[in-house]
Amino acid sequence: MPGKGEENGWQGTRQGRKGFRVKAVVCTRYGPPEVLRVEDVPMPVSRRNQVSIRVAATAMTSSDCYVRGLNLPARYRVAARLAVGLTRPRRRILGMVLAGEVVSAGADATAFGPCDQVFGLDRHAFGTYAEYVCWPQDTVLAAMPAGLTHEEAAAIPYGGLLALHFLRRAGVRGGQRVAAYGASGAVGTSAVQLARHVGADVTGVCSGANLELVRSLGAATVIDYTAEDFTEPAALRRHLRRSRETQERSRPPAGPPGAGPRRDLHLGRRRNTEAARQRPDPAEGAGRPWPCELPLSAALVSGS
Ligand SMILES: NC(=O)c1ccc[n+]([C@@H]2O[C@H](COP(=O)([O-])OP(=O)(O)OC[C@H]3O[C@@H](n4cnc5c(N)ncnc54)[C@H](OP(=O)(O)O)[C@@H]3O)[C@@H](O)[C@H]2O)c1
């Protein structure tokens, strides 16, 4: 019976197999999803600082769709073609997110070894719509948390890192009201959960079909953008009022007899003063700490 790593023909090789072919989804021209084709391509060969990874799951992200379809406003198209390829995508194999197993590591790539389960994102390398990929070990790559499936892990880095970056940058913390516009997407679902994690009161905007999903992720208020224009001042005021009412309802009941409203107010003021003195830097989040084991790559969001 073959050992772990042996079944794919990797046992005993550190640099991959030249001439060995693997399956990949390739994109040879710009267009709708139909331009994608499954092909046999040469197996990638890792360099000294790279790890070879057998891709178990990837994510089809909105960035992949932009590169494949180049479906952008006219004013961005020339710049986009210069960046990703004049007449067709320069990188034939798209995909920047993966979860999978390390099958070999180059001589200088000591952070990971064969059989390590990893997940991550590389905005520049692409190539994860394939059975194997070689990535530098210092890209956004980390050991997969125990208990996650590959599919679950692959769903995290793209939206999760972007949402985490901007929520941190905005200094979102407990007690604040946060609106996630596009709350049912890759970035939005992460933003809703992360904002809830630090105790913010979240309003999610998405289509009617996804309202329940967004509510189940922790949004106190949900808005269907197909039914009303969230950006209209009247709608905004209505939702802020609803959100305030939800907050009021979820407040703990009044204290024991004797602790009347005036006393509550007074104690509350003292507690607030105390809390203000102890309040950590808003950028750190005032409630629970921001969760993140992956190194947050500034490059990841530099195009935002
Ligand atoms: N610069 C960067 O590095 C970077 C990286 C990642 C993403 N982004 C951008 O961030 C945005 C979100 O990305 P994503 O990956 O989360 O996209 P996604 O998964 O496609 O999600 C799109 C979200 O927008 C909602 N939506 C669609 N049409 C809408 C409308 N007319 N009004 C309000 N909401 C609408 C969708 O709701 P329903 O599905 O319920 O209709 C969904 O929640 C995209 O614009 C993407 O280009 C930028």
Image (spheres, helix red, strand yellow):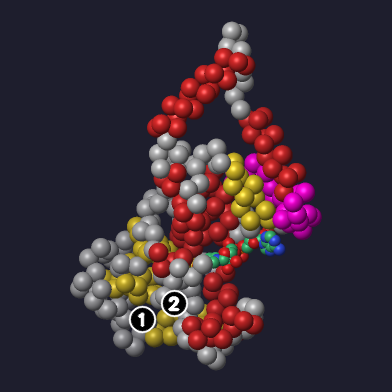
Bin the neighbour count of mark 2 within 10 Å (Cα to Cα): few under 14, some 14-19, many 20 and up.
many
- Image depth: mark 1 or mark 2 in front: 2
Residue of label 1: 44
Residue, far right: 227
Point 51% across, 67% down: residue: 304
Q: Observer-nearest residue: 150 or 180?
A: 180
As displayed, is residue 116 above or below residue 14?
A: above
Classify mark 2: helix, strand or loop: loop
Label 1: how many Cα within 10 Å (few below 14, some 14–19, many 20+): many
215 falls in the magenta region: yes
Compare residues 223 and 133 and report the one nearer the observer.
223
For residue 107, side relative to residue 132 (left or right): left
Mark 1 or mark 2, earlier in chain: 1
Give the magenta range: 211-235
Asked where in the image residue 265 lies, by quadrant, the reply is top right
On screen, residue 281 above or below 180? above
Q: Toward which corner of the image does residue 6 lie, by quadrant?
A: bottom left
How far across and how far down the image is residue 194, in percent? 51, 48
| Residue designated by label 2 | 127
**Quarter holding residue 252:** top right
**Residue drawn 30% across and 68% down?**
137
Q: Secondary structure at mark 1?
A: loop
Magenta segment includes 289? no
Q: Are marks 1 and 2 in contact (CB under 8 Å)?
A: yes
Q: Position of residue 80 (x, y in %)?
A: 54, 82
Q: CA distance from mark 1 to mark 2?
A: 10 Å
